[in-house]
Amino acid sequence: MGVCKQGEIIRRPSATDINWPVVLDVNFKGKSVISSLDSQKVSIKKTGMYNLFFVACDPKLKDMVMSGKTVWKNPDGYLPGRMAPLKKFYVFMALAYVCLSIVWFFQYVRFRDDVLQLQHCITAVIALGLFEMILWYFEYVNFNNTGMRPIVLTTWVVTVGTIRKTISRLLILSVSMGYGVVRPTLGGLTSKVLLLGITYFLASELLNITEYVGTINDVSGRARLLLVLPDAFLDAFLILWIFTSLSRTLEQLQAKRSSVKLDIYRKFSNALAVTVISSVAWIGYEVYFKATDPFNERWQSAWVITAFWDVIAFALLCVICYLWAPSQSSQR
């Protein structure tokens, strides 16, 4: 069309800054396969989303294969802008778990002779939650300081988080079945609950390892989309089983006229319903957010997507702690 010459890039200036985009020419001399850009500096003066493109304009280079890495650093460290707020968020979440731990531990020690097996499980979930938040914080600090995500450290964080998620879901399922309140054991359902737990752990672990371990890119790959499906299916199955069990437990308590237990389970079912509705609504928002922001232009608020799930899990744990707190009447 006559608007450019072969080997040149068509550069359309930005509407907000005529100096952008910046085009840097790379030349390879002779048989050299290495070229340096050290002599060309690009000054970044404004906060925003910046993209780096490698473009080969010479037809002779159509089969060229590039390898290497780019290093990005913000004024306060290597953390990408969309991840940086999570470092502070995990500090606040760790403090929240510490406060919950202190209150729970005080009640736990005070009524240690009346503690139920169910309350041991709640203690384990609180401890895992606190440990996970601390590990996430140190993982982000390390990433921010070095620009690297060590595979061993990130795998540890992901695994602890997956164990916490799995035990939390099994705890909610067991409570819904009346374990520790209506029935002393799960009986023949124990093996099925454990099998579901192991399956959920494996699916969630694979998903989280793919998403976090060694990953620094802002855009998730296709592998994550494939691994999301089994995780989402198991979550849906768990929710269905939980509400079915909860309905049966409420019917049993009504038939036995156990007013105190019935009141606890009604409050629990209401909290669970609010959690599920909120989660479904948030999933819809998350899909909309990602579909309408393919280039991460709303990167400053992207951290909220991840943070929501930790907040809602903590809120539901607080409700469970309140309803099943150790007391002198726990055994009764």
Image (cartoon, grey):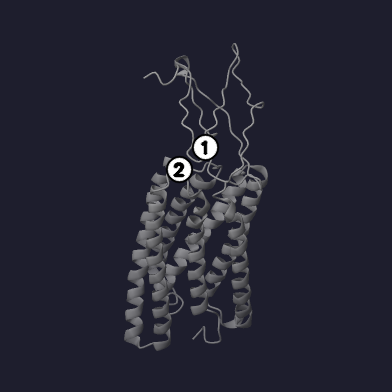
Report the side of 71 relative to 264 (left or right). right
Residue at the spot 49% in from the left edge and 74% down from the top edge: 319
Asked whether the beta carbons under mark 2 and mark 1 sit within 8 Å of each other, the answer is yes
Q: Earlier in the sequence, mark 2 or mark 1?
A: 1
From the viewer's perspective, tell me whether residue 120 is left or right of residue 290: right
Q: Can residue 178 be seen in this view?
A: no
Q: Mark 1 points at which residue?
A: 51
Q: Is residue 331 visible?
A: yes
Q: What kind of element bears circle 2?
A: loop
Alpha-carbon distance for marks 2 and 1? 9 Å
Foreground residue, 325 or 13? Answer: 13
At x 53%, y 79%, the residue is 325
9 vs 269, nearest the viewer = 9
- What's the mark number on residue 228? none
Quadrant containing the N terminus is: top left
Amino acid of disc 1: Asn
Q: In this view, does 113 lie to the left or right of 238?
A: right
> Amino acid type of disc 2?
Phe
Count the numbered circles shown.
2
Out of 114 and 33, give the one closest to the viewer: 33
Query: Where's residue 291, x and y in %?
Result: 38, 48
**Position above or below: 137 against 43:** below
Question: Which labelled disc corresponds to residue 295?
Answer: 2
Residue 34: give x, y in percent of width and height.
Answer: 61, 20
Q: In which quarter of the image is residue 134?
A: bottom right
For mark 1, does the 10 Å Cα neighbourhood hold few (<14), some (14 to 19), or many (20 or more) residues?
few
